[in-house]
Amino acid sequence: MNEPQLELFENISVKTKGKTIDESFAEFDKKNPHVYRNLVKLAYQCTRSGRKIIGIALLYEKLRWDYMIQTDGADYKLPNNYASRYARKIMAENEGLEGIFRISSLRPKKGRKYGK
């Protein structure tokens, strides 16, 4: 089976202090569009292999693994806090990936900010 070629870029970190998780995710996603593209490629690869349900954590760890193996750079910074946001975004924006991830409902604490 041919694996999709993943894009290897250094991730750009974002400052989270004083921001909600949705605000910091939006900024991270905007500064690191390759993360989303790679997760989508991997999700489609899973569906082509017959998988109906997968975990976003599996794809996260695959990205981390590939980056570690294919580069001699620093750790691949992929915040776990954003996993559920990526899962929801992928399912909402990509035909054929609706319902691919098992997710629970978000229960954000109103007004909670990082660093507070």
Image (cartoon, grey):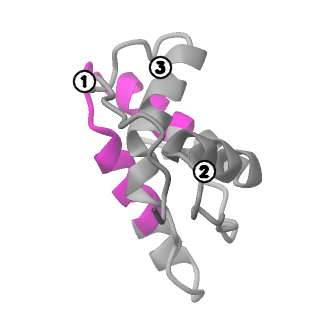
For this rendering, which residue is in front, 4 or 116? 116
The answer to whether residue 51 is magenta is: yes
For this rendering, which residue is in front, 62 or 11? 11
| Residue plotted at (38% across, 47% down) | 59
Question: Is label 2 or label 3 in front?
Answer: 2
Residue 94 visible in the displayed image: no
Task: Measuring from the top left, give residue 10's x and y in whole percent.
Answer: 68, 71
Callout 3: 10 Å neighbours few (<14), some, many (20+)? some
Give the magenta-colored segment's residue range.
Answer: 40-64
**Quick check: 10 left or right of 58?**
right
Mark 1 lies on a secondary structure that is: loop
Mark 3 lies on a secondary structure that is: helix
Pointer 1 residue:
53
Quadrant (top left, top right, bottom left, bottom right) of the C terminus: bottom left
Task: Please name the amino acid that badge 1 sits on.
Answer: Ile
Mark 2 lies on a secondary structure that is: helix
| Residue plotted at (55% across, 10% down) | 95
The answer to whether residue 3 is magenta is: no
Task: Please name the amino acid that badge 3 sits on.
Answer: Met
Earlier in the chain: of badge 2 and badge 3, it is: 2
The residues tagged by marks 3 and 1 sit, at their Cα atoms, a distance apart of 12 Å
- Residue 39's disc is none
Report the predominant secondary structure element of the magenta stretch.
helix
Pointer 2 residue:
24
Quadrant (top left, top right, bottom left, bottom right) of the N terminus: top left
Task: Measuring from the top left, give residue 71's x and y in whole percent.
Answer: 58, 81
For this rendering, which residue is in front, 76 or 110? 110
- Residue 91's disc is 3
The residues tagged by marks 1 and 2 sit, at their Cα atoms, a distance apart of 27 Å
Task: Please name the amino acid that badge 2 sits on.
Answer: Ser
